[in-house]
Image (cartoon, rainbow, N blue to C red):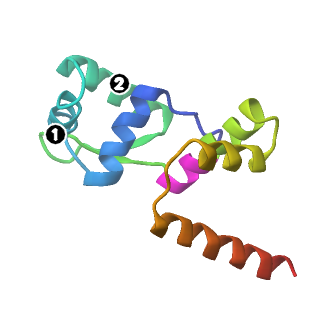
Amino acid sequence: MKQHKPTESELEILGILWERGASTVREVHEKLAETKEAGYTTTLKLMQIMYEKGLLTRDASSKTHIYAAAVSQSATQQQLLNKMIDTVFGGSATQLVMQALGHHKSSDEELDQIRKYLSEIEKQQR
């Protein structure tokens, strides 16, 4: 089955569900409304479409439907990152990393994590 690439609005909803876990449309809508202007019916329709696309699961056993993310956060991040590397950085993960590190103030903790990760990659490639 082909996995659909989520739109920006769908990613916002997935982010809420990844953070909160299974939720009602009302719960998702209230969280969305904290940061953007969105009508309840728009949120409902979008979540129904996401269910049809296979991005969400829906438990209809009670009066209020409960939705959950049907796609993992890490798989979705990897899919979107691969697409960005291919289209924006000419297939070069190095260019992506250099751009990100060159234009983002990293904390000492983040830099330590990056060094540790690079060290692990080097060990695996030997």
Secondary element at tag 2:
helix
Q: Name the residue under label 1.
A: 27
Precedes in sequence: disc 2 or disc 1: 1
Q: Main secondary structure of the magenta part?
A: helix
The answer to if 120 sits in the magenta stretch is no
The answer to if 77 sits in the magenta stretch is yes
Q: How crowded is mark 2: few (under 14 residues within 10 Å), some or many (20 or more)?
A: some
Please tell me whether residue 26 is drawn above or below residue 44 in the rendered image. Answer: below
Label placed on residue 46: 2
Q: Specify start and end residues of the magenta stretch as a single range.
A: 73-78
- Residue found at x 40% / y 42%: 56
Secondary element at tag 1:
helix
Task: Give the x, y percent position of residue 41.
Answer: 21, 18
Residue type highlighted by circle 2: Leu
The quadrant of the rendering that contains the C terminus is: bottom right
Can you see residue 72? Answer: no
Judging depth in this view, the residue of 119 and 18 nearest the camera is 119
Distance from the alpha carbon under mark 2 to that under mark 1: 14 Å
Task: Give the x, y percent position of residue 45.
Answer: 31, 21
Judging depth in this view, the residue of 42 and 94 nearest the camera is 94
- Residue found at x 77% / y 36%: 86
Q: Which residue lies furthest to the right in this view?
A: 126
Q: How crowded is mark 1: few (under 14 residues within 10 Å), some or many (20 or more)?
A: some
Task: Give the x, y percent position of residue 61.
Answer: 20, 48
88 to the left or right of 45: right
Can you see residue 68? Answer: yes
